Image: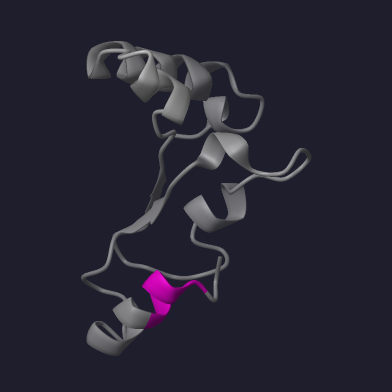
Amino acid sequence: MTTSDGLQMARECDAKGIRTIGVITKIDIMDKGTNAKRMIEGKDVGLRLGFIGIKNRSQQDIIDRIPVKVAIEKEQLYFSTHPVYSSMP
């Protein structure tokens, strides 16, 4: 993640990382045994405003017309029960 195109572009506009908020998307489909804890905690890339992880709606949720409200509830359940993320703010 530290070499992502988005972070590279952000560094061009905000070299010190004081105006950039990092967003880690699709956090729920990371390879088994991995997580984004170090990134969210700012241990890999320092951003003054930090990072946030999100669980996107799946394509199947979109096809099934799952309401955004329900998707948000699923995201909250995912983070509140995850063995790593549930202990993070």
Residue 5 visible? The answer is yes
Residue 22 shown left or right of residue 13 in the figure = right
Question: Residue 33 appears at what percent x and percent y?
Answer: 78, 40
* Residue furthest to the front: 63
Look at the image and tell me in which quarter the N terminus lies.
bottom right
Is 73 placed above or below 57 here?
above
Frontmost residue, 51 versus 3: 3
72 in the magenta segment: no
Question: Residue 63 appears at what percent x and percent y?
Answer: 37, 20
Frontmost residue, 29 versus 41: 29
Q: Residue at x 44, y 30 (%)?
A: 59
Q: Quadrant of residue 57?
A: top left
Is 4 placed above or below 67 here?
below
Residue 44 shown left or right of residue 69 in the figure = right
7 in the magenta segment: yes
Question: Residue 75 appears at what percent x and percent y?
Answer: 41, 22
* Residue furthest to the right: 33
Q: Which residue is drawn at 41% across and 38% down?
A: 54
**Which residues fall within the magenta stretch?**
4-8
Q: Which residue is drawn at 54% across and 76% down?
A: 3
